[in-house]
Image (tube, grey):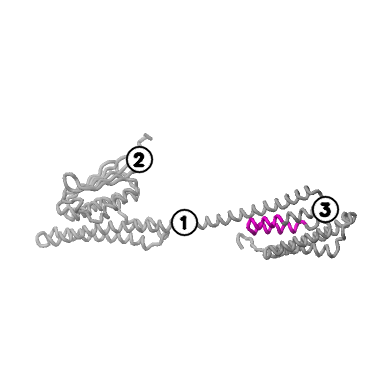
Amino acid sequence: MQGGRVRARVDPLVIDVVLACVLAALTIVYGRQAYEAVYRQEGRPPFGLLAIGLSLAVNLPLAVRRRAPWVAFAVSHGAFVVYTAAGFQPSANLWAPLLLCFTMIRHNPERRAAWAAVVTAATWVASGLAAHISVELAIGQSVIGVGVVWSWATSINRLAQRNVQLAELTAQLRREQELRARHAIVEERLRIARELHDVVAHHLSALAVQAGLADFVFASDPAAAREAVVSIGTSSREALEEMRGLLGVLRTSPGVGDPDQLYQSSPGLERLDDLVERTRAAGLDVTLAVTGPQRSLPSGVDLCAYRIVQEALTNTVKHAGRGARVSVGLRFEADRLAGEISDQGGSTSAALPSNGLGLLGMRERVRLYGGSLRAGPRAEGGFEVVFTIPLAPLETAGGG
């Protein structure tokens, strides 16, 4: 039961049996009455046992029109031809052959259906001629009757084909939606993998440099060694926090959990000062300058800008050498965020990692948001990374 209604499916065989019996009964009743009222005066044979038997043979095959359509069609039309040839009233048994013609057109290829239509039309013409009507009228009523049935059956066939095609398209659309959903999941996990690369690369580079510094000055400068060890603890805790959040996303099934909680560990420009402090603890001289009207950024853009600065500083820690001077500049403009990270150390394009994954990752991030990025050696020495990310234009005061 659905929606308070019970849906019962009736067996088509039962419908066909009822149809055959009702049509046979109506034909016999009509035939006997028509004979007494009209056809007795015309001298036609009485509507007796032979006429009743032939009428049953014409109509009862409707009961198996779905199970054995060609047998039903042949028996009905054969009995109709015998009935007409015997001289019985011609108007009594017209409809069963026409319904069987509909069945043949409905469930057979067009060529076979055409043969069934031709046979039905011929029996109708013969019946019309037996009723002593003109040849033109006999042919006309045959063409109209069979033509209506042909049009009706072919229209139902076209509708059924469209329904099948619609069902196939629906199934295909469902499969494509599932594939798109899977693709989105894969893309999201690749993004998380890039996040993990950034986190691990930056923090491990900083930890390695700070550990080396602590070992180097352990005896000569205990205060500096202590500061390096404290910085190692801070960097490691932050790395664990970020990786814990990202791995939590990987463990969580899509659509489960609170997205805000899953991504709350993703850093942004508000943590830029901490990043600069960690880089200074690694032995670099870092200056940070942020100019222009600062504003809240979309989370994706905020994370993108942070990761670019982080990757650039990580490369500097790896390749510029201790004591190198690094400048980080961010400029908020009306319709974009511009950034420049440059060093005056020994960093060159040749010193960058050979696989280039850091630069590729930065370019991909910026391209996702419609921005641009340029990275390469500076003419005066060192290395620089320059990027811009479009922002929604600021509204001017007073509506412009």
Residue 375 visible in the displayed image: yes
Amino acid, disc 3? Ala
Q: Residue at x 33, y 48 (%)?
A: 367
Q: Position of residue 224 (x, y in %)?
A: 14, 58
Q: Residue at x 82, y 61 (%)?
A: 28
Say above or below: 100 vs 372.
below
Amino acid, disc 2? Pro
Residue 287 visible in the displayed image: no
The residue indicated by pointer 2 is 393
Would residue 92 appear left or right of 223 to someone viewing this image? right
Q: Secondary structure at mark 2?
A: loop
The residue indicated by pointer 3 is 131
* Label 1 – label 3 distance at C-alpha: 62 Å
Count the numbered circles shown.
Answer: 3
Would residue 97 appear left or right of 200 to someone viewing this image? right
* Label 1 – label 2 distance at C-alpha: 37 Å
Q: Residue at x 30, y 54 (%)?
A: 267
Q: Position of residue 170 (x, y in %)?
A: 52, 56
Q: Position of residue 305 (x, y in %)?
A: 29, 49
Asked whether 22 falls inside the magenta stretch, the response is no
* Label 2 – label 3 distance at C-alpha: 88 Å
Q: Position of residue 343 (x, y in %)?
A: 19, 48
Asked whether 100 falls inside the magenta stretch, the response is yes
Rendering quarter of residue 72: bottom right
Q: What is the magenta range?
A: 94-118
Q: Say which of marks 2 and 3 sits in front.
A: 3
**Tag of residue 176:** 1
The N terminus, quarter of image: bottom right
Q: Secondary structure at mark 3?
A: loop
Rendering quarter of residue 248: bottom left
